[in-house]
Image (cartoon, grey):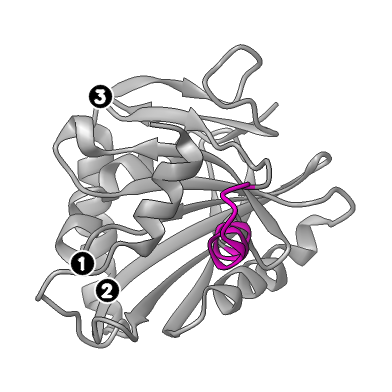
């Protein structure tokens, strides 16, 4: 299945019956969550790398993907279906704020429902623009709330901004957790985003997301 079609299907997929509470939590809860994520990240097995020339997705950054997760470049060519509404919808889903979908890493082969998606922007931004650009990305998704921004740094000292937030589907009237991080490179800013079918799936996929963040390098 073409990655463009998979992207559309994934972005149109709703949540399950479970909902999430307030993303804001006490410092002690945040510390415990960080400790659990760190432990899970160390345990997850790397299945390869995306980003370098010759890989499934050539990007301005590289990072490790979890074992069994399947990366595929996203075709951003205009959809020509003959249906004007469908074409406009497809075009809108391939862009989010100043970013264009570039790569989709599918968790289904590993037993989860969701993706890590990579979005790229135009060159010209600087590292100090990272959080502002990430805010544009979140705002463009729509129906988001409880966003909490922070700084991050990979093991290779690539630094940037990160956000955790809630997304609510108006159609399904359900809410789930999402998160993303951004790094600004000479070739342009890159956002790595983790959604998920619902909050339970999102949390199950966190080790793969944390692995990507920890191993992030610029190309």
Spatial separation of the CA atoms under disc 1 and disc 2: 5 Å
Residue behind mark 3? 68
Spatial separation of the CA atoms under disc 3 and disc 1: 21 Å
Location of residue 45 in the rendering, given as x and y in whole percent from the top left corner:
25, 24
Q: Does the magenta stretch include residue 55?
A: no
Among the two numbered marks 3 and 2 on one chain, the one whose residue lies closer to the N terminus: 3
Q: Which residue is drawn at 21% across and 48% down?
A: 113
Q: Is residue 195 above or below residue 189?
A: below
What are the residue bounds of the magenta stretch? 79-92
Image quarter hosting the N terminus: top left
Q: Which residue is drawn at 44% across and 48% down?
A: 7
Q: In this view, does 126 lie to the left or right of 168?
A: right
Q: Are marks 1 and 2 in contact (CB under 8 Å)?
A: yes
Residue behind mark 2? 176
Q: Is residue 54 left or right of residue 66?
A: right
Spatial separation of the CA atoms under disc 3 and disc 2: 24 Å
Residue behind mark 1? 199
């Amino acid at each position: 299945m073409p990655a463009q079609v998979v992207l559309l299907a994934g972005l149109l997929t709703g949540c399950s019956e479970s909902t999430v509470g307030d993303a804001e939590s006490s410092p002690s809860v945040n510390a415990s969550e960080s400790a659990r994520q760190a432990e899970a990240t160390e345990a997850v097995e790397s299945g390869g790398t995306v980003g370098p020339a010759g890989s499934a997705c050539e990007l301005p950054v590289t990072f490790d993907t979890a074992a069994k997760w399947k990366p595929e470049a996203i075709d951003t060519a205009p959809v020509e279906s003959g249906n004007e509404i469908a074409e406009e919808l497809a075009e809108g889903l391939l862009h989010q704020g100043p970013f264009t979908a570039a790569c989709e890493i599918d968790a289904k082969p590993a037993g989860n429902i969701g993706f890590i998606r990579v979005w790229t922007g135009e060159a010209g931004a600087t590292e100090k623009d990272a959080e502002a650009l990430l805010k544009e990305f979140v705002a463009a998704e729509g129906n988001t709330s409880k966003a909490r921004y922070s700084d991050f740094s990979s093991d290779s000292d690539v630094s940037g901004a990160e956000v955790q937030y809630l997304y609510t589907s108006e159609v399904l009237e359900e809410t789930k957790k999402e998160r993303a991080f951004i790094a600004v490179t000479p070739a342009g800013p890159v956002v790595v985003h983790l959604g998920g079918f619902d909050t339970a799936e999102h949390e199950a996929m966190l080790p793969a997301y944390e692995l990507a963040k920890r191993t992030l390098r610029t190309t």
